[in-house]
């Protein structure tokens, strides 16, 4: 069986990201960083009190909202029935990448990523993504790895509209080829030092160093294998100034669908992934089952 993953990729062009240290409530950076963190705090406060009138102007028209069960909503659906608040913004961490800012809040096994986009009228929430991680690792033996990767490593059922989209896809294909080969040295250059991946199937967030160690471990054990395939007719890319949002569905080799958000930035001419958040769609049947 193959597992389907719906993913969102946000890409931003800039130099170094600016991390913002957060305490009991968000600490504000100077300039645009202060503006967006104020917007994020206002949004989280309004969501916590179910204040739809205050939430409405902060939501981008292209909003993609995913709850911890993997249910995905657009802006209209969110405003019809405002989802409940699962976390406040205490202890949040943020990175500023010019016209894209990521804000992440963690509480035990629950994680929330917010991606904000700079619009002419101000900062707007582009992605809201929850992940609830497993309490313990799954029992049983994993399925044997698939050793050949055609899609997405060599070809994808999506035609990029511009050089930015083409550059992100090229980097994605290269890093997935490295995953297939279990080649941590080839994988690492495609990721920012602050990279973090959070999956429903995992028990803890994984840093760049964690992923390198896992790839090396898989290579030694012979368990490295191909990622899921990009599904046709499910890819959507949106341009936000020097940023692109890619919504897509991939078809892994077993299990239920997941929704994924990935954020990319451009440093020294290279596209680097900074975060990947992946939520299993609980209501979906495993791929291959009716």
Image (cartoon, rainbow, N blue to C red):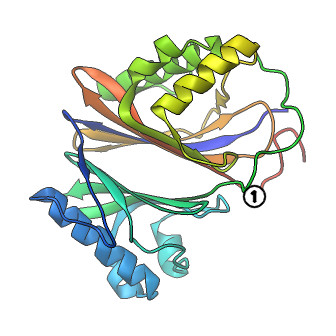
Instruction: Say which quarter of the image contains residue 166.
Output: top left
Residue 196, image x and y in percent? Answer: 47, 41
Residue 232, image x and y in percent? Answer: 63, 32
Rendered view: 209 above or below 53: above
**SS category of the residue bearing label 1:** loop
Rendered view: 5 above or below 37: above
Residue drawn at x 47%, y 25% as measured from the top left: 159
Instruction: Say which quarter of the image contains residue 282.
Output: bottom right
User: Left or right of 168: which side holds 99?
Assistant: left
Query: Disc count in the image?
Result: 1
- Residue ID for mark 1: 282
Rendered view: 58 above or below 201: below
Q: Nearer the viewer, residue 289 or 105?
A: 105
Which image quarter holds the N terminus? Answer: top right
* Residue 153 in sight: no
Instruction: Say which quarter of the image contains residue 152.
Output: top right
* Residue 40 in sight: yes
User: Left or right of 243: which side holds 52?
Assistant: right
Residue drawn at x 22%, y 55% as measured from the top left: 118
Residue drawn at x 44%, y 88% as measured from the top left: 49
Q: Nearer the viewer, residue 109 or 32?
A: 109
Residue 61, image x and y in percent? Answer: 37, 63
User: Left or right of 60: which side holds 211?
Assistant: right
Rendered view: 84 above or below 216: below
Residue drawn at x 48%, y 12% as measured from the top left: 185
């Amino acid at each position: 069986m193959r597992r389907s993953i719906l993913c969102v990729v946000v890409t931003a062009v800039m130099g170094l990201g600016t991390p913002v240290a957060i305490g009991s409530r968000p600490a504000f950076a100077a300039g645009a960083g202060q503006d967006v963190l104020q917007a994020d705090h206002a949004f989280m406060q309004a969501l916590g009190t179910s204040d739809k009138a205050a939430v409405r102007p902060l939501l981008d028209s292209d909003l993609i909202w995913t709850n911890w069960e993997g249910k995905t909503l657009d802006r209209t659906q969110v405003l019809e029935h405002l989802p409940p608040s699962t976390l406040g913004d205490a202890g949040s961490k943020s990175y500023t990448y010019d016209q894209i800012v990521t804000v992440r809040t963690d509480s035990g096994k629950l994680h929330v990523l917010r991606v904000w986009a700079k619009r002419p009228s101000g900062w707007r929430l582009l992605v809201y993504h929850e992940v609830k991680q497993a309490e313990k690792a799954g029992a049983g033996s994993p399925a044997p790895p698939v050793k050949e990767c055609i899609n997405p490593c060599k070809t994808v059922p999506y035609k990029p509209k511009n050089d930015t989209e083409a550059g992100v896809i090229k980097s994605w294909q290269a890093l997935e080829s490295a995953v297939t080969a279990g080649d941590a040295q080839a994988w690492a250059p495609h990721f920012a030092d602050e990279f973090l991946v959070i999956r429903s199937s995992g028990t803890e967030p994984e840093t760049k160093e964690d992923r390198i160690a896992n790839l090396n471990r898989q290579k030694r054990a012979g368990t490295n294998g191909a990622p899921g395939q990009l599904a046709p007719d499910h890819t959507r890319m949106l341009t936000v100034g020097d940023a692109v949002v890619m919504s897509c569905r991939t078809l892994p080799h077993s299990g239920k669908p997941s929704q994924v958000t990935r954020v990319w930035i451009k440093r020294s001419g290279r596209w680097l992934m900074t975060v990947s958040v992946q939520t299993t769609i609980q209501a979906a049947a495993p791929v291959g089952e009716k």
